[in-house]
Amino acid sequence: MKKLLCLTTGLVLMAGTAYAEDVWTGGDGLPTSPLACDGSPATLTASPYNGATVQNAPDLKGKQISIVDVPKLIGIGYFTATAKGVADAAKDLGNVDAKTDGPTKANIDDQITLIDNYVTSGVNGIVFAANDPEAIAPVLKKALSKGIHVVGYDSDSTPDAREWFVNQASFNGVAKALIDNIASQIGEDGAFAIVTSTFTTPVQARWISEMSAYTAKCHPKMKWLETVEAQEDNILSFNQANTLMNKYGDELKGIIGMTTVATPAASEAVKQANMCGKIAVTGLALPNAMKPYINGGCINGVVLWNPSDLGYAATEVLRAAVDGTLKPGDTSVKAGKLGDLKIVDGSVVLLGDPVTFTKENINNFDF
Amino acid sequence: MLSRYVFRHETILALLLVLALALSANLSDRFFTVDNLLNQGRMLTEVGIIAIAMTFVIITGGIDLSVGSILGLSAITLGVVWKTLGVPLPLAMVVAVLAGAVCGAVNGVIIIKSRMPPMIATLGTLALYRGLAEGISQARSVRGYPEWFFVLGQGEFFGVPTQLWVFGLLVVVAAIILGYMTFGRVTYAVGANETAARFSGMNVDRAKLLIYTASGSMAALAAVIFVSRVSTTRSDMGMGIEMDAISAVVLGGTSIFGGRGTMIGTLLGILLIQTMKNGLTLAGVKGDGTIIVIGSILILTILISNLVNRKRD
């Protein structure tokens, strides 16, 4: 029994040291490029194509094709919206059979297995949002080697495992929008905390890195209290927001939600604690989930792109790649109702600037 | 005499498996290809390896919920020991498996010394090991493994995925130990009646410690294969894999109360689940539909098997 106690204590100590690291922002540690504080546009540099090439693809120009859309997970509003965009694009194009299928949890293994099965079943194209850029690469490369066109959206794989990637908004653009938004509400010396999905999710980690760089550059006096994980889970996000309020008390002036689940959950937590107006919440969120809080005046504004457009664009890009109208070296691509989209960084299609939803415009959006 | 074989749970399972295979082949012409079947073999290996050890654990009347977390912690150990500490990769692989063994042994010691129910003990270590994995990794994934390392998870050996050889070998060894060796008899005895086993002079504690250590080691081995298959290391690897392994074992006819179960049953359970997953997807059923079917099959199979066996008694 004594031995057991020693053992347990040892383990607890080990766990303790593992967590003893100081203010961990949750970034990915990769180089950052914060935008100018006054909002002057960043210069876009053209670089050579760095996506992959599909091998022995059958010539399907203008012919009926079947594609599968594999989001990170199914059953949350965000990916329901992207799936709707995929279906809309398929309808507009008229020669695409599209289907959305994804894991029920944001799990790398389930997603890989699913894609693998679709490769076997013989689709002509795959659009995906990766749960892990590296882990998804082998199965996508396998698809490419079997003549299947591959386009990413939302969360990228390594560039050599897909042809094109549709980026919802540049990382530094989102970072600037979020930090400027919170700064305008809590002031230049306010303190804020972040509720993210997990530290391992590539997009969130990228945004956080950019946010931390932009904060240091343009709002140096603001205090970054803590970044906490809440998966993409409603209840966990709500609890984490409550924990932050209890832990920091009056010091906490703002919360930024990095997922479309965390932002409304944090808003609900603030509302239930009667802290509307005392604690500002912003973050990435779907307008429908935020309408009660924004119309009710508790929350000022949230940031997002239109996820339906994202799915729409990915499907249009895939069709263009199949038809051969989008080739390496192109600087723009026609995407149906979305018009011409810019191509940057070799193989990244830009959807556009993020939208800030406020009381004035939120009721114009329905997703 | 014949009925003894006809009504065995394993026979029912084998029939179901044949039925599932026939149905899948019928629903999609892409199912019954060598390419697809071998590929499915590649994907079931990690769950399979864990289920082998889990069979022993459940036969003793225990359960090991922490295997998914051990998988995550071992994967992180592999990555950190190799990349951060600069240890040669083959040695790092050994260290990772040892780390899994230590985790398993800790489970065993807690269960034996404190007489804590295995479900509670491993529920605790499920959280503890995952937390350690996340803490040690600092949420960073380790990438950039050398090409030779991928042979294990992505390569082939005589036309068959490398990891299937490992899995096959382990199944045979485990089946021999469980069915024909003294250790196997002790395992059954512990599960059937632990007190009786103790009074018969069996070293129950030693058996349990060995089994939980093996369970941890197998999870770690699965981790090394998994890392090689997906070419990256993440702290959330293997989350929920314990449920897949337990499902396969229970579907294979191992009694959750202990004392009963076979390796061939577990193997059939794994194959049946994988066939259904793959067959249904190829037939155009979506992911959510597939898990509903698998859940129903699990309940129905056990139900049928119980009914048939009760009638015979």
Image: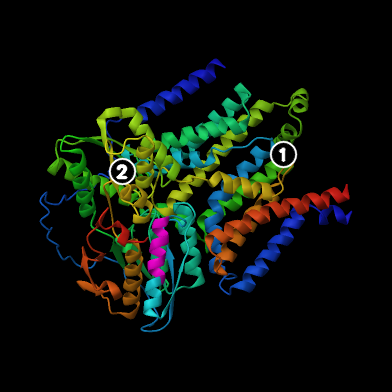
Q: Going 34% across and 57% down the picture, which residue do you hit? A: A155
Mark 1, Cα crowd under 10 Å, few <14 / some 14-19 / many 20+, is: few
Image quarter in which the C terminus of chain A is found: bottom left
In the image, B136 versus A185, the foreground residue is: A185
Residue placed farthest to the front in the image?
Answer: A296
* Disc 2 target residue: A298
In the image, B110 versus A269, the foreground residue is: A269
- Residue A31 within the segment the image draws in magenta: no
Horizontal placement of A23 versus A230: left or right?
left
Horizontal placement of A211 versus A363: left or right?
left
SS at badge 2: loop
In the image, A27 versus B167, the foreground residue is: A27
Residue B266 x, y percent position in the rendering? 66, 49
SS at badge 1: loop
**Quadrant of res A11:** top left
Residue B161 drawn above or below residue A302: below
Q: What whole-number distance in Å separates the C-alpha atoms at marks 2 and 1?
A: 69 Å
Residue A236 x, y percent position in the rendering? 43, 40
Can residue A183 be seen in this snapshot?
Answer: yes
In the image, B308 versus B52, the foreground residue is: B308
**Quadrant of res B18:** bottom right
Mark 2, Cα crowd under 10 Å, few <14 / some 14-19 / many 20+, is: many
Q: Going 53% across and 60% down the picture, which residue do you hit? A: B287
Image quarter in which the N terminus of chain A is found: top right
**Dot label at residue B181:** 1
| Magenta-drawn segment | A77-87
Residue placed farthest to the top in the image?
Answer: A2
Do badges 2 and 1 share one subunit?
no
Report the chain holding disc 2: A
Report the chain holding disc 1: B
Residue A86 drawn above or below residue A37: below
